[in-house]
Amino acid sequence: MEAEGQARLQLAGVSKTFGAVRVLDDVSLDIAAGEVHALVGQNGSGKSTLIKVLAGFYQADPGATAVIDGAPRELGDPNDIHAAGVRFVHQDLGLVPALSVVDNLALGHGYARSQGMRINWREQRAAARRALAAVGYELDVRRLVDDLQPVERTAVAIARALQSAHGEMSILVLDEPTATMPKGEVQRLVQIVRAVRSRGVGVLYVSHHLEEVFELADRVTVLVDGQRVGTERCSQIDHKKLVTMMTGGVVDDVRRRAVGTRGKTMLSLERLSGAELTGLDLQVRAGEVVGVAGITGSGREEICSLVFGSKPRRGTVTVGDRELPPSRPDRSCRAGLALVPANRLRDGVVIGLNVRENLNITTTRGLAKFSFIRPGLDRRQAAALGTKMSVKAPSLDASIEALSGGNQQKVVLGKWLQTNPSVLLLDEPTQGVDISAKAEIHRLIDDAVSQGLAVLVCSSDEAELERLCDRVVVLREGRAVAEVAAPDIRTRQLIHLSLGLTA
Ligand SMILES: Nc1ncnc2c1ncn2[C@@H]1O[C@H](COP(=O)(O)OP(=O)(O)OP(=O)(O)O)[C@@H](O)[C@H]1O
Ligand SMILES: [Mg+2]
Protein backbone atom coordinates (compact mmCIF):
# COMPACT_ATOMS: atom_id res chain seq x y z
CA MET A 1 0.00 0.00 0.00
CA GLU A 2 1.27 3.46 -0.81
CA ALA A 3 2.65 5.23 2.25
CA GLU A 4 1.55 8.76 2.88
CA GLY A 5 4.27 11.20 3.87
CA GLN A 6 6.14 9.96 6.90
CA ALA A 7 4.38 6.86 8.21
CA ARG A 8 3.47 6.91 11.89
CA LEU A 9 1.98 3.43 11.90
CA GLN A 10 2.35 0.52 9.51
CA LEU A 11 0.29 -2.54 10.34
CA ALA A 12 0.60 -5.54 8.06
CA GLY A 13 -0.71 -9.08 7.82
CA VAL A 14 -3.08 -8.86 10.76
CA SER A 15 -5.33 -11.90 11.07
CA LYS A 16 -7.38 -12.96 14.06
CA THR A 17 -9.35 -16.14 14.58
CA PHE A 18 -11.70 -16.91 17.44
CA GLY A 19 -12.16 -20.68 17.50
CA ALA A 20 -13.02 -21.55 13.92
CA VAL A 21 -14.11 -18.05 12.93
CA ARG A 22 -11.69 -15.80 11.12
CA VAL A 23 -12.62 -12.28 12.16
CA LEU A 24 -9.66 -10.47 10.56
CA ASP A 25 -7.99 -11.75 7.43
CA ASP A 26 -4.58 -10.39 6.48
CA VAL A 27 -5.42 -6.73 7.12
CA SER A 28 -2.86 -4.01 6.43
CA LEU A 29 -3.16 -0.34 7.29
CA ASP A 30 -0.82 2.62 7.43
CA ILE A 31 -1.30 6.04 8.96
CA ALA A 32 0.84 9.05 8.17
CA ALA A 33 1.91 11.86 10.47
CA GLY A 34 -0.85 14.47 10.50
CA GLU A 35 -3.35 12.16 8.86
CA VAL A 36 -6.86 11.30 9.98
CA HIS A 37 -7.46 7.78 8.73
CA ALA A 38 -11.03 6.54 8.98
CA LEU A 39 -11.86 2.88 9.47
CA VAL A 40 -15.37 1.94 8.37
CA GLY A 41 -17.39 -1.22 7.86
CA GLN A 42 -20.63 -2.89 8.74
CA ASN A 43 -21.37 -4.17 12.23
CA GLY A 44 -19.13 -7.13 12.90
CA SER A 45 -16.70 -6.37 10.09
CA GLY A 46 -13.76 -6.38 12.52
CA LYS A 47 -13.04 -2.70 13.31
CA SER A 48 -12.95 -3.03 17.09
CA THR A 49 -11.05 -6.30 16.85
CA LEU A 50 -8.33 -4.63 14.79
CA ILE A 51 -8.08 -1.89 17.42
CA LYS A 52 -7.94 -4.45 20.22
CA VAL A 53 -5.14 -6.27 18.42
CA LEU A 54 -3.22 -3.00 18.10
CA ALA A 55 -3.84 -2.26 21.77
CA GLY A 56 -2.46 -5.66 22.76
CA PHE A 57 -5.80 -6.70 24.23
CA TYR A 58 -6.03 -9.57 21.73
CA GLN A 59 -3.12 -11.61 20.40
CA ALA A 60 -3.08 -11.60 16.59
CA ASP A 61 -2.53 -14.82 14.64
CA PRO A 62 1.15 -15.36 13.73
CA GLY A 63 2.55 -13.20 10.95
CA ALA A 64 1.25 -9.78 11.95
CA THR A 65 3.74 -6.92 12.13
CA ALA A 66 3.65 -3.35 13.41
CA VAL A 67 6.10 -0.55 12.70
CA ILE A 68 5.64 2.69 14.64
CA ASP A 69 7.65 5.76 13.69
CA GLY A 70 10.06 3.55 11.80
CA ALA A 71 10.70 1.08 14.63
CA PRO A 72 9.34 -2.48 14.66
CA ARG A 73 7.10 -3.09 17.68
CA GLU A 74 5.78 -6.13 19.46
CA LEU A 75 2.06 -6.57 18.77
CA GLY A 76 0.28 -8.07 21.75
CA ASP A 77 2.37 -6.16 24.29
CA PRO A 78 0.30 -3.24 25.61
CA ASN A 79 3.32 -1.65 27.31
CA ASP A 80 5.42 -1.64 24.18
CA ILE A 81 2.60 -0.08 22.18
CA HIS A 82 2.04 2.55 24.87
CA ALA A 83 5.76 3.34 24.98
CA ALA A 84 5.63 3.85 21.23
CA GLY A 85 3.10 6.64 21.79
CA VAL A 86 -0.13 4.95 20.72
CA ARG A 87 -3.13 6.18 22.70
CA PHE A 88 -6.67 4.84 22.78
CA VAL A 89 -9.84 6.68 23.64
CA HIS A 90 -12.38 3.91 24.04
CA GLN A 91 -16.07 4.53 23.92
CA ASP A 92 -16.49 4.52 27.69
CA LEU A 93 -13.61 7.06 27.84
CA GLY A 94 -12.23 5.67 31.12
CA LEU A 95 -12.83 8.86 33.11
CA VAL A 96 -13.92 9.04 36.75
CA PRO A 97 -17.25 10.91 36.70
CA ALA A 98 -17.23 11.85 40.40
CA LEU A 99 -13.91 13.69 40.09
CA SER A 100 -13.19 17.08 38.54
CA VAL A 101 -11.54 17.71 35.21
CA VAL A 102 -8.32 18.68 37.03
CA ASP A 103 -8.26 15.38 38.92
CA ASN A 104 -9.05 13.32 35.86
CA LEU A 105 -6.21 14.93 33.93
CA ALA A 106 -3.83 14.45 36.86
CA LEU A 107 -4.73 10.75 37.16
CA GLY A 108 -2.83 9.89 34.05
CA HIS A 109 0.04 12.20 34.75
CA GLY A 110 0.58 12.96 38.43
CA TYR A 111 -0.09 16.15 40.37
CA ALA A 112 2.05 19.29 40.32
CA ARG A 113 3.88 19.55 43.66
CA SER A 114 5.27 22.51 45.52
CA GLN A 115 8.13 22.30 47.99
CA GLY A 116 7.20 19.93 50.79
CA MET A 117 5.30 17.78 48.28
CA ARG A 118 2.00 19.59 48.73
CA ILE A 119 -0.16 19.61 45.66
CA ASN A 120 0.09 22.96 43.96
CA TRP A 121 -3.53 23.42 42.93
CA ARG A 122 -3.01 26.69 41.15
CA GLU A 123 -0.33 25.09 38.97
CA GLN A 124 -2.44 21.96 38.61
CA ARG A 125 -5.41 23.92 37.29
CA ALA A 126 -3.19 25.83 34.91
CA ALA A 127 -1.75 22.53 33.64
CA ALA A 128 -5.24 21.18 33.10
CA ARG A 129 -6.18 24.29 31.14
CA ARG A 130 -3.02 23.95 29.03
CA ALA A 131 -3.81 20.29 28.32
CA LEU A 132 -7.26 21.25 27.11
CA ALA A 133 -5.94 24.19 25.14
CA ALA A 134 -3.65 21.76 23.33
CA VAL A 135 -6.76 20.19 21.87
CA GLY A 136 -8.27 23.61 21.23
CA TYR A 137 -10.68 23.41 24.15
CA GLU A 138 -11.61 25.63 27.01
CA LEU A 139 -13.78 24.80 30.00
CA ASP A 140 -13.95 25.33 33.74
CA VAL A 141 -11.52 22.64 34.91
CA ARG A 142 -13.03 22.56 38.41
CA ARG A 143 -16.28 21.05 37.10
CA LEU A 144 -17.07 17.40 37.75
CA VAL A 145 -16.77 15.14 34.74
CA ASP A 146 -20.27 13.88 35.53
CA ASP A 147 -21.68 17.35 34.81
CA LEU A 148 -20.01 17.70 31.41
CA GLN A 149 -21.60 17.18 28.03
CA PRO A 150 -20.44 14.12 26.08
CA VAL A 151 -18.22 16.14 23.77
CA GLU A 152 -16.62 17.87 26.77
CA ARG A 153 -15.89 14.49 28.33
CA THR A 154 -14.36 13.27 25.11
CA ALA A 155 -12.21 16.41 25.01
CA VAL A 156 -10.94 15.64 28.52
CA ALA A 157 -10.20 12.02 27.53
CA ILE A 158 -8.28 13.15 24.45
CA ALA A 159 -6.40 15.83 26.38
CA ARG A 160 -5.41 13.20 28.91
CA ALA A 161 -4.26 10.82 26.18
CA LEU A 162 -2.14 13.61 24.72
CA GLN A 163 -0.43 14.62 27.92
CA SER A 164 0.07 11.13 29.36
CA ALA A 165 2.44 10.25 26.54
CA HIS A 166 5.80 9.13 27.86
CA GLY A 167 7.34 10.95 25.03
CA GLU A 168 5.11 12.32 22.42
CA MET A 169 1.79 10.96 21.24
CA SER A 170 2.24 9.35 17.88
CA ILE A 171 -1.10 7.73 17.14
CA LEU A 172 -4.52 8.48 18.59
CA VAL A 173 -7.21 5.83 18.15
CA LEU A 174 -10.85 6.85 18.52
CA ASP A 175 -13.47 4.05 18.40
CA GLU A 176 -16.89 5.56 17.62
CA PRO A 177 -16.28 8.79 19.56
CA THR A 178 -19.51 10.40 18.38
CA ALA A 179 -21.88 7.49 18.92
CA THR A 180 -23.71 9.29 21.71
CA MET A 181 -23.27 12.88 20.52
CA PRO A 182 -25.92 15.12 19.00
CA LYS A 183 -24.77 16.70 15.74
CA GLY A 184 -24.24 20.09 17.36
CA GLU A 185 -21.59 18.56 19.61
CA VAL A 186 -20.00 16.56 16.81
CA GLN A 187 -18.86 19.80 15.22
CA ARG A 188 -16.85 20.60 18.32
CA LEU A 189 -15.24 17.18 18.29
CA VAL A 190 -14.25 17.70 14.67
CA GLN A 191 -12.36 20.84 15.77
CA ILE A 192 -10.57 18.90 18.51
CA VAL A 193 -9.48 16.13 16.17
CA ARG A 194 -8.21 18.73 13.71
CA ALA A 195 -6.18 20.36 16.49
CA VAL A 196 -4.63 16.98 17.34
CA ARG A 197 -3.86 16.28 13.69
CA SER A 198 -2.15 19.63 13.29
CA ARG A 199 0.38 18.50 15.91
CA GLY A 200 1.51 15.76 13.55
CA VAL A 201 -0.32 12.95 15.33
CA GLY A 202 -1.82 10.23 13.15
CA VAL A 203 -5.47 9.60 14.02
CA LEU A 204 -7.35 6.34 13.48
CA TYR A 205 -11.04 7.20 13.47
CA VAL A 206 -13.84 4.61 13.60
CA SER A 207 -17.34 5.80 12.86
CA HIS A 208 -20.63 4.73 11.33
CA HIS A 209 -21.35 8.35 10.39
CA LEU A 210 -20.05 8.74 6.88
CA GLU A 211 -20.57 12.53 6.87
CA GLU A 212 -17.93 12.72 9.60
CA VAL A 213 -15.59 10.56 7.58
CA PHE A 214 -15.83 12.92 4.62
CA GLU A 215 -15.55 16.01 6.77
CA LEU A 216 -12.57 14.87 8.78
CA ALA A 217 -10.61 12.04 7.21
CA ASP A 218 -7.82 12.20 4.65
CA ARG A 219 -8.13 8.54 3.78
CA VAL A 220 -10.58 5.78 4.58
CA THR A 221 -10.07 2.04 4.86
CA VAL A 222 -13.06 -0.23 4.39
CA LEU A 223 -13.43 -3.63 6.05
CA VAL A 224 -15.89 -6.23 4.82
CA ASP A 225 -16.09 -9.46 6.81
CA GLY A 226 -12.63 -8.94 8.23
CA GLN A 227 -10.95 -8.22 4.91
CA ARG A 228 -9.65 -4.89 3.73
CA VAL A 229 -11.51 -4.20 0.49
CA GLY A 230 -9.80 -0.90 -0.12
CA THR A 231 -8.16 2.28 1.10
CA GLU A 232 -9.20 5.45 -0.66
CA ARG A 233 -8.40 9.11 -0.49
CA CYS A 234 -11.62 10.81 0.71
CA SER A 235 -11.32 13.58 -1.84
CA GLN A 236 -11.42 10.97 -4.58
CA ILE A 237 -14.57 9.05 -3.68
CA ASP A 238 -18.11 10.04 -2.85
CA HIS A 239 -20.66 8.85 -0.34
CA LYS A 240 -22.26 6.45 -2.78
CA LYS A 241 -18.99 4.80 -3.73
CA LEU A 242 -18.08 4.37 -0.08
CA VAL A 243 -21.43 2.79 0.72
CA THR A 244 -21.01 0.48 -2.25
CA MET A 245 -17.60 -0.58 -0.99
CA MET A 246 -19.03 -1.30 2.46
CA THR A 247 -22.21 -3.06 1.46
CA GLY A 248 -21.79 -4.10 -2.14
CA GLY A 249 -24.81 -2.00 -3.01
CA VAL A 250 -26.59 1.24 -2.30
CA VAL A 251 -28.57 1.46 0.91
CA ASP A 252 -32.05 2.79 0.49
CA ASP A 253 -33.26 4.47 3.66
CA VAL A 254 -36.04 6.64 2.32
CA ARG A 255 -39.29 7.04 4.13
CA ARG A 256 -42.11 5.24 2.35
CA ARG A 257 -44.74 5.41 5.04
CA ALA A 258 -47.30 8.05 4.23
CA VAL A 259 -48.47 10.26 7.06
CA GLY A 260 -51.31 7.82 7.65
CA THR A 261 -54.67 7.89 9.26
CA ARG A 262 -54.08 7.94 12.96
CA GLY A 263 -56.03 6.04 15.52
CA LYS A 264 -56.90 7.05 19.02
CA THR A 265 -54.41 8.46 21.51
CA MET A 266 -52.33 5.60 22.89
CA LEU A 267 -49.84 7.50 25.03
CA SER A 268 -50.56 10.68 26.87
CA LEU A 269 -48.08 12.63 29.00
CA GLU A 270 -49.30 15.43 31.21
CA ARG A 271 -46.97 17.80 33.02
CA LEU A 272 -44.26 15.12 32.94
CA SER A 273 -41.21 16.21 34.93
CA GLY A 274 -37.96 14.60 36.06
CA ALA A 275 -34.47 15.81 36.98
CA GLU A 276 -34.17 17.99 33.89
CA LEU A 277 -37.49 17.70 32.09
CA THR A 278 -40.11 20.21 33.17
CA GLY A 279 -43.85 19.95 32.52
CA LEU A 280 -43.98 18.12 29.20
CA ASP A 281 -47.42 17.59 27.62
CA LEU A 282 -47.44 15.18 24.71
CA GLN A 283 -49.78 12.75 22.98
CA VAL A 284 -48.92 9.89 20.65
CA ARG A 285 -51.66 8.25 18.64
CA ALA A 286 -51.85 4.76 17.20
CA GLY A 287 -50.02 4.70 13.87
CA GLU A 288 -47.94 7.75 14.72
CA VAL A 289 -44.24 8.30 15.39
CA VAL A 290 -43.43 11.27 17.59
CA GLY A 291 -39.80 12.27 17.99
CA VAL A 292 -37.95 14.17 20.67
CA ALA A 293 -34.86 16.22 19.80
CA GLY A 294 -32.56 18.10 22.14
CA ILE A 295 -28.93 18.45 23.12
CA THR A 296 -27.44 16.63 26.09
CA GLY A 297 -29.00 17.96 29.29
CA SER A 298 -32.15 19.19 27.55
CA GLY A 299 -34.22 16.45 29.16
CA ARG A 300 -34.19 14.26 26.05
CA GLU A 301 -32.11 11.53 27.65
CA GLU A 302 -34.49 10.94 30.56
CA ILE A 303 -37.91 10.96 28.89
CA CYS A 304 -38.08 7.26 28.10
CA SER A 305 -37.14 6.17 31.62
CA LEU A 306 -39.59 8.66 33.13
CA VAL A 307 -42.44 7.36 30.98
CA PHE A 308 -41.55 3.72 31.54
CA GLY A 309 -41.24 4.21 35.29
CA SER A 310 -37.61 3.22 35.65
CA LYS A 311 -36.87 6.73 36.96
CA PRO A 312 -39.00 8.70 39.47
CA ARG A 313 -41.31 11.22 37.86
CA ARG A 314 -43.92 13.85 38.48
CA GLY A 315 -46.94 14.32 36.25
CA THR A 316 -49.15 11.64 34.71
CA VAL A 317 -48.58 8.97 32.09
CA THR A 318 -51.60 7.32 30.48
CA VAL A 319 -51.48 4.34 28.12
CA GLY A 320 -54.79 3.69 26.36
CA ASP A 321 -57.15 4.79 29.08
CA ARG A 322 -55.09 3.47 31.97
CA GLU A 323 -53.06 5.86 34.08
CA LEU A 324 -49.76 4.19 35.00
CA PRO A 325 -48.41 4.19 38.54
CA PRO A 326 -44.94 5.77 38.75
CA SER A 327 -41.86 3.64 39.35
CA ARG A 328 -43.54 0.42 38.24
CA PRO A 329 -41.92 -0.77 35.01
CA ASP A 330 -43.67 -4.13 35.44
CA ARG A 331 -47.08 -2.45 35.32
CA SER A 332 -45.95 -0.40 32.34
CA CYS A 333 -45.10 -3.62 30.47
CA ARG A 334 -48.47 -5.13 31.28
CA ALA A 335 -50.21 -2.00 30.04
CA GLY A 336 -48.57 -2.56 26.63
CA LEU A 337 -45.54 -0.32 26.89
CA ALA A 338 -42.12 -1.49 25.68
CA LEU A 339 -38.82 0.32 26.12
CA VAL A 340 -35.63 -0.08 24.11
CA PRO A 341 -33.09 1.68 26.34
CA ALA A 342 -30.22 3.76 25.03
CA ASN A 343 -27.42 2.13 26.94
CA ARG A 344 -28.19 -1.29 25.56
CA LEU A 345 -24.92 -2.85 26.55
CA ARG A 346 -25.63 -1.96 30.15
CA ASP A 347 -29.42 -2.18 30.32
CA GLY A 348 -30.40 -4.18 27.28
CA VAL A 349 -28.63 -7.49 26.91
CA VAL A 350 -28.31 -10.16 29.54
CA ILE A 351 -24.65 -11.07 29.83
CA GLY A 352 -24.29 -14.78 30.53
CA LEU A 353 -27.21 -15.78 28.32
CA ASN A 354 -26.58 -16.75 24.72
CA VAL A 355 -27.91 -15.07 21.59
CA ARG A 356 -31.04 -17.25 21.37
CA GLU A 357 -31.94 -16.74 25.03
CA ASN A 358 -31.48 -13.01 24.70
CA LEU A 359 -33.69 -12.87 21.63
CA ASN A 360 -36.47 -14.91 23.20
CA ILE A 361 -36.34 -13.59 26.72
CA THR A 362 -39.39 -11.34 26.30
CA THR A 363 -41.60 -14.13 24.98
CA THR A 364 -40.62 -17.12 27.08
CA ARG A 365 -44.20 -17.76 28.21
CA GLY A 366 -45.42 -18.10 24.65
CA LEU A 367 -42.74 -20.67 23.94
CA ALA A 368 -43.69 -22.93 26.80
CA LYS A 369 -46.11 -25.81 27.08
CA PHE A 370 -46.88 -27.15 30.57
CA SER A 371 -44.00 -25.01 31.87
CA PHE A 372 -41.51 -26.58 29.46
CA ILE A 373 -39.92 -24.50 26.73
CA ARG A 374 -40.48 -26.17 23.37
CA PRO A 375 -36.92 -26.28 22.01
CA GLY A 376 -37.86 -26.49 18.33
CA LEU A 377 -40.12 -23.46 18.55
CA ASP A 378 -37.54 -21.65 20.66
CA ARG A 379 -34.86 -22.13 18.00
CA ARG A 380 -37.16 -21.36 15.07
CA GLN A 381 -38.39 -18.14 16.62
CA ALA A 382 -34.88 -16.96 17.49
CA ALA A 383 -33.59 -17.89 14.05
CA ALA A 384 -36.43 -16.06 12.31
CA LEU A 385 -35.95 -12.96 14.43
CA GLY A 386 -32.19 -13.07 13.98
CA THR A 387 -32.67 -13.19 10.21
CA LYS A 388 -35.29 -10.44 10.24
CA MET A 389 -32.96 -8.16 12.20
CA SER A 390 -29.95 -9.31 10.15
CA VAL A 391 -28.07 -10.24 13.31
CA LYS A 392 -24.58 -11.43 12.49
CA ALA A 393 -23.62 -14.03 15.08
CA PRO A 394 -21.28 -17.01 15.02
CA SER A 395 -24.33 -19.10 16.04
CA LEU A 396 -27.52 -18.80 18.07
CA ASP A 397 -25.70 -20.54 20.90
CA ALA A 398 -22.82 -18.07 20.94
CA SER A 399 -22.44 -15.95 24.04
CA ILE A 400 -23.93 -12.50 23.60
CA GLU A 401 -20.57 -10.92 24.39
CA ALA A 402 -19.07 -12.45 21.26
CA LEU A 403 -21.32 -10.23 19.12
CA SER A 404 -20.08 -6.89 17.85
CA GLY A 405 -21.60 -3.81 19.48
CA GLY A 406 -24.06 -3.14 16.67
CA ASN A 407 -25.25 -6.72 16.57
CA GLN A 408 -25.99 -6.74 20.30
CA GLN A 409 -28.17 -3.70 19.71
CA LYS A 410 -30.16 -5.46 17.00
CA VAL A 411 -30.84 -8.32 19.41
CA VAL A 412 -32.27 -5.91 21.98
CA LEU A 413 -34.50 -4.10 19.51
CA GLY A 414 -35.69 -7.40 18.05
CA LYS A 415 -36.72 -8.89 21.36
CA TRP A 416 -38.93 -5.92 22.15
CA LEU A 417 -40.52 -5.63 18.73
CA GLN A 418 -41.75 -9.20 19.03
CA THR A 419 -43.68 -8.54 22.23
CA ASN A 420 -46.31 -6.72 20.11
CA PRO A 421 -46.57 -3.69 22.39
CA SER A 422 -49.15 -0.98 21.79
CA VAL A 423 -46.68 1.79 22.62
CA LEU A 424 -42.97 1.55 21.90
CA LEU A 425 -40.44 3.85 23.53
CA LEU A 426 -37.17 4.04 21.62
CA ASP A 427 -34.13 5.72 23.07
CA GLU A 428 -31.40 6.14 20.45
CA PRO A 429 -32.65 3.16 18.44
CA THR A 430 -29.78 3.01 15.95
CA GLN A 431 -26.83 4.22 17.97
CA GLY A 432 -23.75 2.27 16.90
CA VAL A 433 -25.69 0.41 14.21
CA ASP A 434 -24.32 0.30 10.66
CA ILE A 435 -26.09 1.95 7.75
CA SER A 436 -27.72 -1.17 6.30
CA ALA A 437 -28.96 -2.30 9.67
CA LYS A 438 -30.15 1.23 10.38
CA ALA A 439 -32.22 1.25 7.21
CA GLU A 440 -33.54 -2.17 8.16
CA ILE A 441 -34.52 -1.04 11.66
CA HIS A 442 -36.23 2.04 10.23
CA ARG A 443 -38.24 -0.19 7.89
CA LEU A 444 -39.25 -2.48 10.76
CA ILE A 445 -40.43 0.53 12.75
CA ASP A 446 -42.38 1.79 9.73
CA ASP A 447 -44.06 -1.61 9.36
CA ALA A 448 -45.03 -1.80 13.00
CA VAL A 449 -46.41 1.74 12.90
CA SER A 450 -48.44 1.01 9.79
CA GLN A 451 -50.10 -1.74 11.79
CA GLY A 452 -51.12 0.68 14.50
CA LEU A 453 -48.17 0.84 16.89
CA ALA A 454 -47.61 4.20 18.61
CA VAL A 455 -43.93 5.16 18.84
CA LEU A 456 -42.09 7.75 20.89
CA VAL A 457 -38.48 8.05 19.72
CA CYS A 458 -35.79 10.09 21.44
CA SER A 459 -32.69 10.52 19.32
CA SER A 460 -29.56 12.61 19.18
CA ASP A 461 -29.47 11.85 15.45
CA GLU A 462 -31.63 14.57 13.93
CA ALA A 463 -31.50 12.98 10.49
CA GLU A 464 -33.04 9.88 11.99
CA LEU A 465 -35.90 11.95 13.40
CA GLU A 466 -36.48 13.49 9.98
CA ARG A 467 -36.55 10.01 8.47
CA LEU A 468 -38.89 8.40 11.01
CA CYS A 469 -41.23 10.91 12.55
CA ASP A 470 -44.62 12.40 11.87
CA ARG A 471 -43.96 15.10 14.46
CA VAL A 472 -40.86 16.17 16.40
CA VAL A 473 -40.84 18.05 19.69
CA VAL A 474 -37.65 20.01 20.39
CA LEU A 475 -36.50 20.36 24.00
CA ARG A 476 -34.26 23.02 25.40
CA GLU A 477 -33.34 23.32 29.07
CA GLY A 478 -36.03 20.85 30.03
CA ARG A 479 -38.90 22.47 28.17
CA ALA A 480 -40.58 21.89 24.83
CA VAL A 481 -39.70 24.95 22.76
CA ALA A 482 -40.86 23.93 19.29
CA GLU A 483 -42.81 21.33 17.38
CA VAL A 484 -42.40 20.50 13.70
CA ALA A 485 -44.57 18.17 11.63
CA ALA A 486 -43.85 16.09 8.52
CA PRO A 487 -43.32 16.81 5.69
CA ASP A 488 -41.60 19.92 7.05
CA ILE A 489 -39.15 18.20 9.40
CA ARG A 490 -35.59 19.13 8.42
CA THR A 491 -32.40 17.94 10.07
CA ARG A 492 -30.72 21.35 9.99
CA GLN A 493 -33.71 23.08 11.45
CA LEU A 494 -33.87 20.56 14.30
CA ILE A 495 -30.20 21.21 15.07
CA HIS A 496 -30.76 24.96 15.08
CA LEU A 497 -33.82 24.73 17.28
CA SER A 498 -32.02 22.40 19.72
CA LEU A 499 -29.11 24.81 20.04
CA GLY A 500 -31.38 27.84 20.33
CA LEU A 501 -30.03 29.46 17.17
CA THR A 502 -32.39 31.32 14.95
CA ALA A 503 -32.69 29.46 11.66
N1 LIG B 1 -14.42 -12.78 21.87
C1 LIG B 1 -14.97 -13.14 20.70
N2 LIG B 1 -15.25 -14.42 20.41
C2 LIG B 1 -15.81 -14.79 19.23
N3 LIG B 1 -16.12 -13.91 18.25
C3 LIG B 1 -15.87 -12.62 18.49
C4 LIG B 1 -15.28 -12.16 19.72
N4 LIG B 1 -15.16 -10.81 19.65
C5 LIG B 1 -15.63 -10.46 18.44
N5 LIG B 1 -16.06 -11.54 17.75
C6 LIG B 1 -16.63 -11.54 16.39
O1 LIG B 1 -15.78 -10.78 15.58
C7 LIG B 1 -16.51 -10.10 14.58
C8 LIG B 1 -16.02 -8.67 14.51
O2 LIG B 1 -16.41 -7.96 15.68
P1 LIG B 1 -15.97 -6.45 15.94
O3 LIG B 1 -16.41 -6.13 17.32
O4 LIG B 1 -14.55 -6.29 15.60
O5 LIG B 1 -16.88 -5.69 14.87
P2 LIG B 1 -17.00 -4.13 14.58
O6 LIG B 1 -16.58 -3.92 13.17
O7 LIG B 1 -16.32 -3.34 15.63
O8 LIG B 1 -18.59 -3.95 14.65
P3 LIG B 1 -19.52 -2.78 15.30
O9 LIG B 1 -19.64 -1.74 14.24
O10 LIG B 1 -20.83 -3.48 15.50
O11 LIG B 1 -18.87 -2.31 16.56
C9 LIG B 1 -17.96 -10.24 14.94
O12 LIG B 1 -18.59 -11.11 14.04
C10 LIG B 1 -17.96 -10.83 16.34
O13 LIG B 1 -19.03 -11.71 16.50
MG1 LIG C 1 -16.99 -2.03 17.20
Image (cartoon, helix red, strand yellow):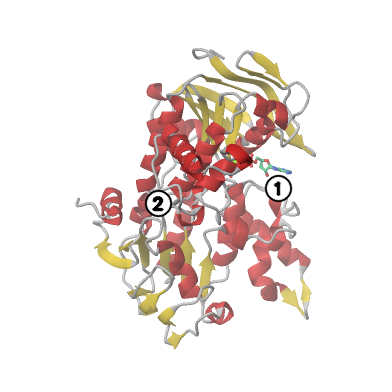
Q: Quadrant of the N terminus?
A: top right
Query: In what quadrant does ligand 1 lie?
Result: top right
Q: Are marks 1 and 2 in contact (CB under 8 Å)?
A: no
Residue 346 in view of the camera = yes
At label 1, counting other C-alpha atoms closer than 10 Å, the crowd grade (few under 14, some 14-19, many 20 or more) is some
Q: Which of the marked residues, 1 or 2, is nearer the chain's N terminus?
A: 1
Q: CB at mark 1 closer than 8 A to ligand 1?
A: yes
* Position in image of residue 103 (x %, y %): 55, 47
Residue 122 relative to residue 264: left or right: right
Give the answer, above or below, for where 332 lies relative to 186. below
Residue 356 relative to residue 299: left or right: right
Q: Residue at x 41, y 35 (%)?
A: 133
* Position in image of residue 206 (x %, y %): 52, 36
Q: Which residue is mark 2?
A: 461
Circle 1: element type: helix
Give the answer, above or below, for where 280 lies relative to 402. below
Q: Residue at x 42, y 72 (%)?
A: 452
Q: Which residue is mark 1?
A: 402
* Position in image of residue 409 (x %, y %): 58, 54
